[in-house]
Image (tube, rainbow, N blue to C red):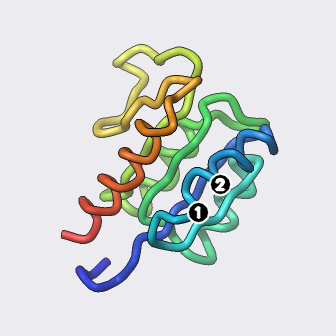
Amino acid sequence: MTADSTPSYLIVDEDPLQLSALRRLFRDVPGTKRSATSAEEALAMAEQEMPSVLIAAYILPGMDGLTLISLLRAKTPDLVCGLHTTSSPSRDMLPPDVTILLKPCPPERMRAFALSAAAVRSK
């Protein structure tokens, strides 16, 4: 991603209400935003266009958010990732440089993560 390009976000959560809330929260954050309700759907979307920022729920149908992060990072090692979860996984399970966003995540913390992730990617 170059300094003049906008970030792209992929938000993954099995709960449509959670996705709707996150879309509203990010509506004025610069960049493209896509959402998926499963890891498999997210992988298919990433095949079409790899996101620069991934926010994934830990609990997903089919495969968990950590597996999704690992698969996408295998293709794009500098992918900025946040894991949206009710409890933090043990450190030995967590890939490097994954931000834990504990549910319920305060809106200002979630927005701060999205904005800082975009800033990191634009450098």
Distance CA(mark 2)–CA(mark 1): 5 Å
Residue farthest along the bottom direction in this orientation: 4
Residue 67 disc label:
none
In the image, 74 versus 31, the foreground residue is 31
Circles 2 and 1, Cβ within 8 Å, touching? The answer is: yes
Residue 74 in the image, given as x and y percentages of width and height: 42, 55
Image-quadrant location for residue 18 = top right
Dot 1: element: loop
Q: Residue at x 42, y 65 (%)?
A: 52
Residue 69 in the image, given as x and y percentages of width and height: 50, 45
In this view, 16 is above or below 122: above
Whether residue 110 sits left or right of residue 1 in the image: it is right
Residue 48 in the image, given as x and y percentages of width and height: 63, 77
Q: The disc labelled 2 sits on which kind of residue? A: Arg
Count of labels in the image: 2
Dot 2: element: helix
Residue 19 in the image, given as x and y percentages of width and height: 71, 47
Q: Residue at x 78, y 36 (%)?
A: 61
Image-quadrant location for residue 2 = bottom left
Whether residue 65 sits left or right of residue 98 in the image: it is right
In this view, 7 is above or below 80: below
In the image, 100 versus 47, the foreground residue is 100
Q: Residue at x 38, y 45 (%)?
A: 113
Q: The disc labelled 1 sits on which kind of residue? A: Arg
| Quadrant where the image shows the C terminus | bottom left
Q: Which residue is mark 1?
A: 27
Q: Which residue is mark 2?
A: 24
Whether residue 10 sits left or right of residue 91 in the image: it is right
Residue farthest along the left direction in this orientation: 123
